[in-house]
Amino acid sequence: MNNITKSIIPVAGFGTRRLPISKAIEKCMLPICNRPIVDYVVQDCIKAGITDIYFVVSGQNTQLEAYYSHNDQLSRYLVANNKQDLLPLIEPPKVNFHYVIQPIEGKYGTAIPVALVAPLIDPGESVVVLMGDDFIYNSDGSSEVERLIAKTPVGGCSMLGVNVPIESVGRYGVLQMDDNNRFVRIVEKPSIDEAPSNLINVSKYVVNYRLLSMIAEFADSQQQGEYYITDPINRYVGQAGELVVVAAEGQYLDGGTLAGWLNANNVVAADIL
């Protein structure tokens, strides 16, 4: 069984798709009901046994760290006003948070934040990689990350796959599978006619040290445009590296767009209200 205790959660950037609100509120901190989007990701990791979470942040990120820090003044206020029952709501989770700064200027893309954390990972270790503005929601409280790790071969790699309506494939990386339902490659944002399936990549991975090193090497190379993490993933599989696709059991909720954020609030609210 895999013993994976570290996760990487990229949350840098300006969240331009959510302007103007993201000018004042970090995109990962936008609320889904009474919790920020990113906390659904963090809590899923904690349930899966993750003990060290590496946030990749930009220099102006302060709200995220404040949320996961102890607030002495607020704690004292609650005690003084006989609201001790609210203290558990503000206690930081009992995990280790690390903050790695991604420069605003320079290379960009999903491979870059993962590469920045790579030197902090010990040789031979595997890590979970999850984006900070979307999540898989399980109304029964189960952990999608735990299932992903459990279904990953020891020392291997995996990703979550989510089925979407075929008319939506052009917004995502689409998974091409062979006749034996084994992963072949990711096709980025294809047209409906060119899409190999309607199974999409939602950027939730288990990455072994070999693939992590390939991501770091790719980020260190010189090219024009965006550095997609899917490029070294495709290269890894092309070099006989196996990657298991695990179908998500929960519901994929995306807070990166206004429509997705509204839907996520409605889905979660229907459960808790």
Image (spheres, rainbow, N blue to C red):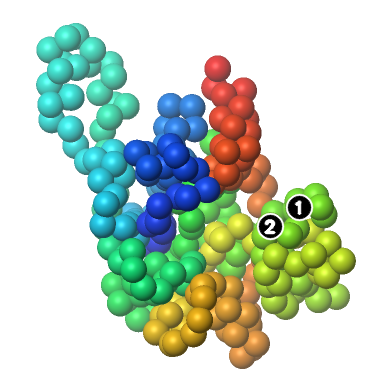
Task: Bin the neighbour count of mark 2 within 10 Å (Cα to Cα): few under 14, some 14-19, many 20 and up.
Answer: few
Tell me which residue sits at (75%, 67%) in the image: 190
Out of 178 and 25, give the one closest to the viewer.
Answer: 25
- Asked which quadrant contains residue 29, the reply is top left
For the residues labelled 2 and 1, the Cα–Cα distance comes to 6 Å
The x, y position of residue 270, in whole percent, is 62, 23
Q: Residue flagged by tag 2: what amino acid is it?
A: Arg
Residue at the spot of label 1 = 168
The x, y position of residue 135, in whole percent, is 54, 46
The x, y position of residue 34, in whole percent, is 43, 27
Residue at the spot of label 2 = 171
Q: Is residue 39 left or right of residue 102?
A: right
Q: Is residue 196 above or below residue 232?
A: above
Q: Quadrant of the C terminus?
A: top right
Q: Is residue 23 above or below residue 74?
A: below
Residue at the bottom extreme of this rendering: 239
The x, y position of residue 162, in whole percent, is 69, 54
For label 1, the SS is helix
Out of 18 and 35, give the one closest to the viewer.
Answer: 18
- Asked which quadrant contains residue 59, the reply is bottom left
Q: Are marks 2 and 1 in contact (CB under 8 Å)?
A: yes
Tell me which residue sits at (80%, 65%) in the image: 191
Q: Residue flagged by tag 1: what amino acid is it?
A: Ser
Q: Is residue 229 left or right of residue 198?
A: left
Tell me which residue sits at (61%, 40%) in the image: 260
Residue 46: assigned label? none
Task: Bin the neighbour count of mark 1 within 10 Å (Cα to Cα): few under 14, some 14-19, many 20 and up.
Answer: some
From where the camera sits, is residue 48 visible?
no
For label 2, the SS is helix
Tell me which residue sits at (29%, 41%) in the image: 63
